[in-house]
Amino acid sequence: MASFVINTKAEILKCRKTAAYWLTLIAGVFIPLVSGIMMVAKQDHFIKRLGDDTWRNLMNMNWQPAAAFFLPMYVILVTSLVVQVEFRNNAWKQVYASPRSYADIYFSKFVVVHLLVIASLLAFNISMVLTGVIANTVNGGYKFFATPLPVKEMLTVTAKMYASVLGMTAIQYWISLRLKNYIAPLGIGLALLVTALIIMTWEKIVYYPYAYTALTYFRELNKGDLTHLNYSYIWFVVIVVLGFLDTVKRKERG
Amino acid sequence: MSNHIIETQRLDFLFRSGQPILQQLSLQVPAGSIYGFLGPNGAGKTTTLRLILGLLKKQQGSITIFGKELMAHRLEILRRLGSLIEQPSLYLHLTGRENLEVFRLSYQCPKSRIDEVLDIVKLKDAANKKAKAYSLGMKQRLSIAIALLHDPELLILDEPTNGLDPSGIIETRELIKSLNRDHGKTILVSSHMLSEVEKMATHVGIITKGKQVFQGTLTQLQQLKSKQSAIEIEVSNVSKAKLVLNGHFPVKEVNGTRLLVHYENREKVALMNRTLVQEGVEVYQLSLTQNDLENLFIQITSE
């Protein structure tokens, strides 16, 4: 276990200064930044629109585009980028020739993907709160200072959104490990995501992992029912196990 | 236990298409040696080294390293060896030092090792530069530094001088020799250049088309080479020359206007020349064939 933690640290070090890091930061702050600019630019409109339940309305304004497209797109990109560090540098062979178990190699990188996703979600929440504070400082008409910050709700929504991408991370991770070409996992992921948006009204959509972020946030789509999250866990466990077995059984590495 | 650090027995490897890459390869790398693993490009050298490192799944035969079966003791074995396979595996966006830090964590060796290996490969001054700014020679040296981090007993280096300029080749060769001499490492180094291997190896294994054609000490190889030396003669009339020499001098091969004759000694060469001229055959050129790898292969395989 100690060596797994140390190797995960090594994997984090490998991703430093790569696009995966920058993307995580940008993906986290992008939507809050845009909504913040809008709140400062069109103050009267947004004071009226955000009303008395200011924080919840702001959350809604930020989460909608994230849930529909940005979050799953980020997951697809970041998973690919984390794995690409090895392909791009011809480094898989050195990784597999170092004294690390296959489980260590497979899971430590996957943990890095998840740490980045969590970091991005945190950056999203923090920058969302910051834009509320800034908007209220610029224009006292906003009611952010007058309304308590719904911390518990923010955490609950974030946790559910994280749960909704679990299945997707496992699938994208496996695809990224198998395909050397960076564009391929990206293209496949994007195609699966766009398909989700097209078939959103299908009665069996709960089985389709790329639709889970939208299903989780836009509750009207499935009337508050969150059973699809259970399928996200199942997808996650099954694909992680299959991906790992595939890694162990591979005839050629690096 | 035998004193062979690496031992493969009857190693076979087929590509998915069924094309054989290795056939019955039995390598024996003695402890404390520099084992030059020689063969032309595409002979199966890298495939062999990848099998030895567990990067390719073994199909037939056995691989023992430090007296233990590879796959059953994979981690234990990998902890005791360092490797460099084909082009360098470096994280180009990280500095030399950061690259070493990544692998230091995996090998769990003390931080002080980073400076020590940088010293050995003479990269201390460039340690804080990004690896993408390194020349090929520096990248190769940093890769060797990575292979040395955990002070392994065995080094496996796949064509470490590939793509280097002459001074880079000399530096790398000297480094390999000093690692063997001063640090007591056993080194398996592959190359497609006989001259290169002759300058550093103590033992040599030669493969061509996946088959082992020679294995022994460097001295044995040199004896074989001199025994196999030949004289190449360019003449005006090959068939007549062949007739003249027949019986007195063993003609090995005819190649256009040239004959390849077994070399015995200088006096025999002079006699051969005289005989040809006396019989009216013009001799344009007469030379001792260079013992490059290609010729050596032809000689060994034609036995």
Image (tube, coloured by chain):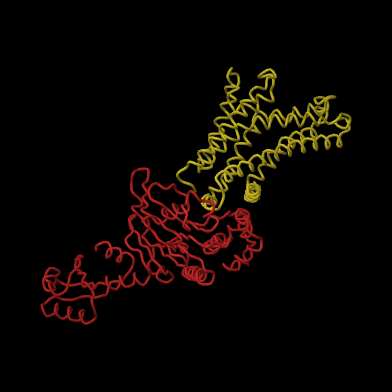
Chain colours: A yellow, B red
Residue B19 shown left or right of residue A210 in the figure: left
Residue A46: which quarter of the image?
A: top right
Q: Give the image location of residue A249, x and y in percent.
A: 48, 41
Q: Quadrant of the C terminus of chain B?
A: bottom left
Q: Give the image location of residue A56, x and y in percent.
A: 79, 27
Residue B235: which quarter of the image?
A: bottom left
* Number of dots carrying numbers: 0
Q: Give the image location of residue B44, x and y in percent.
A: 38, 55
* Residue at left offset 65%, top offset 60%: B110
Q: Is residue B62 above or below residue B113?
A: above
Looking at this view, is A127 or B64 the one in front? B64
Q: Quadrant of the N terminus of chain B?
A: bottom left
Q: Is residue B218 above or below residue B11?
A: below
Q: Residue furthest front?
A: B1
Looking at this view, is B186 or B243 the one in front? B186
* Residue at left offset 77%, top offset 33%: A38
Residue A127 shown left or right of residue B9 in the figure: right
Q: Give the image location of residue B16, x and y in percent.
A: 37, 43
Residue B239: which quarter of the image?
A: bottom left
* Residue at left offset 17%, top offset 81%: B271
Residue A26 shown left or right of residue A196 in the figure: right
